[in-house]
Image (cartoon, rainbow, N blue to C red):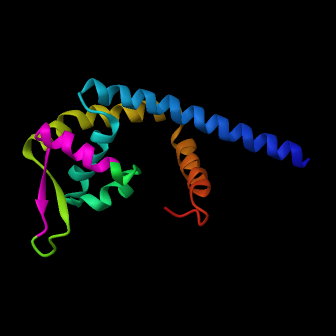
């Protein structure tokens, strides 16, 4: 019985990994067609939806290594999609601020991005999506809370 449970757990891991890879490839294709890499898009999307962010905290919010943030911010700054803004009260802190050009880009691309994600997730019914969210949250954190 224990061997069957282990085999089932391994199968679940493989199925989850393959599903994530397949979905990610489709989502990233659209992002790349619009001239950004997925990390650049994630930073821009974060700034658009959450406002200015300290550079030191962006990595944790979009789940990338903090060492990559400087490179990504540099690339977005070169494209004039964001700018660095010094914190007036703490010189050690620099914020990333989305520019008007960056806002216009996201406002143009995001509707297609969310439609693409919705189409991919629509393979499941509303009830199945709710159940998947619940179960994946349970797997994602020991407490099961996000």
Residue plotted at (24% across, 27% down): 34
Judged left or right of residue 119, residue 45 is left
Q: Nearer the viewer, residue 112 or 97?
A: 97
Residue plotted at (26% across, 36% down): 111
Q: Nearer the viewer, residue 37 or 25?
A: 37
Which residue is farthest bottom? 89
- Residue 95: x, y in percent? 18, 60
Judged left or right of residue 121, residue 19 is right
Q: Nearer the viewer, residue 23 or 118?
A: 23
| Residue 41 seen from this side | yes
Residue plotted at (51% across, 28% down): 22
Residue plotted at (42% across, 27% down): 26
- Residue 138: x, y in percent? 61, 57
Q: Quadrant of residue 141?
A: bottom right
- Residue 61: x, y in percent? 36, 56
Which residue is farthest right? 1
Q: Is residue 69 magenta?
A: yes
Q: How many marks?
A: 0
| Residue 122 seen from this side | no
Q: Nearer the viewer, residue 120 or 31?
A: 31
Judged left or right of residue 102, residue 121 is right
Judged left or right of residue 98, residue 28 is right
Magenta residues, start to end: 68-87
- Residue 123: x, y in percent? 52, 31
């Amino acid at each position: 019985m224990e061997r069957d449970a282990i085999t089932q757990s391994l199968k679940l891991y493989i199925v989850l990994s393959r599903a994530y890879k397949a979905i990610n490839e489709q989502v990233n294709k659209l992002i790349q067609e619009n001239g950004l890499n997925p990390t650049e898009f994630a930073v821009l999307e974060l700034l658009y939806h959450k406002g200015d962010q300290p550079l030191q905290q962006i990595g944790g919010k979009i789940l990338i290594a903090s060492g990559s943030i400087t490179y990504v911010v540099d690339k977005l700054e070169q494209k004039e999609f964001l700018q660095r803004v010094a914190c007036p009260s703490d010189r050690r802190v620099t914020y990333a601020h989305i520019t008007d050009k960056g806002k216009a880009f996201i406002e143009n691309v995001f509707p297609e991005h969310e439609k693409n994600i919705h189409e991919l997730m629509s393979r499941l019914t509303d009830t199945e999506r709710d159940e998947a969210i619940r179960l994946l949250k349970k797997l994602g954190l020991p407490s099961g809370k996000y």
